[in-house]
Amino acid sequence: IDAHLVDQASRMLHARGLLVIAADGTWEVPAPDIALPAWAADTERRARAWRATASELHQVYSAARQAKALNSENRDIGTLADIASATATITAGATKEILCIRAASRRTEQLLLDPYNSHREIFRNAAGHPINVQAIYDPAILDTSGTLEALRERIIGGEEVRLTGPIHFSAIIVDEMAAVIEFSNIDPSGSGALLVRSRPFVTALVRIMRALWALAVPLSSEAAAPLPSTAASRDAIILKLLAGGATDSTITRRLGISQRTVERRVRHLMDSLGAETRFQAGVEAARQGLV
């Protein structure tokens, strides 16, 4: 037997508690029914610790990459995985705020429906400081099962959520310094996305975000509450969703009533408000303080 191999194996077994080496060099093998469960428990404890620190380590790693690339030029991003990585890089270095414009896209679905995303968790930067997050979503995303529930969770986690549409691209803007723009609503592969650090470009995106934010309808605690118990509260939610550009199917999903009922209520509300379009009905209701 190779002595070097035996030496390596004995050190490994000793480190795992599966072999006791006495001071005089003699070996003792512990009972397997005691030693193996103890080693397994220690391994599980280490695995839990590794999993618990994975997110923090990734944020530190992303922040370091961002610091290295602060003066780099804008660059193309080719895949959904690259979009996620670039987004993690710039958001880890946030110090003030993160602004989000989210189309009804493959990337938005990926974000909201990922079972490993903790939507209730307050967003913190690499230093552990909480960051204000404002996000505008195209209401068409609510047609996808599970997205409304995810948005409710994100509101609980501190994200300010508003709806307006249609939105034709997505962008994540960090501290008015950097942004990731993606078009997976057009090309689901993520091709054509950009990581942008040009100040004029980022400033233009911020202005677009502010303008959309002023027009958008908050998905407030009322919209995140259980189903409405009265016709008046139901109509208020319908008007709020109309102002955000929601479709009948989106309203149907939100309220848990038939699409025919939604169509009748929408027509009644439009007539009552003297509105010619659905969006106009929502805006007029907001002007009159009805929502």
Image (tube, rainbow, N blue to C red):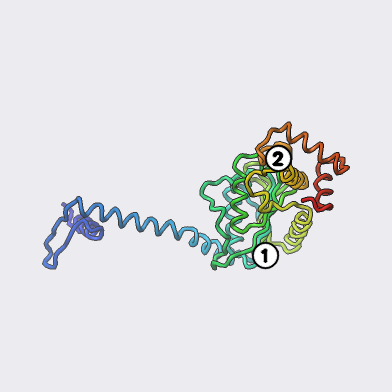
Q: Quadrant of residue 48?
A: bottom left
Q: Nearer the viewer, residue 3 or 105?
A: 105
Q: Which residue is mark 1?
A: 175
Which of the two discs, 2 and 1, sits closer to the camera?
2
Q: Position of residue 160 (x, y in %)?
A: 67, 57
Q: Position of residue 101 (x, y in %)?
A: 70, 53
Is residue 48 among what the camera can see?
yes
On screen, residue 269 versus residue 23, left or right, reads right
* Amino acid tagged 1: Asp
Is residue 171 among what the camera can see?
no
Q: Quadrant of residue 6?
A: bottom left
Q: Position of residue 31 (x, y in %)?
A: 16, 53
Q: Residue at x 75, y 43 (%)?
A: 235
Q: Secondary structure at mark 2?
A: helix
- Asked if the residues shown at circle 2 and circle 1 are in contact, with their CB atoms under 8 angstroms apart, the answer is no
* Amino acid tagged 2: Ile
Q: Secondary structure at mark 1?
A: loop
Q: Residue at x 52, y 46 (%)?
A: 115
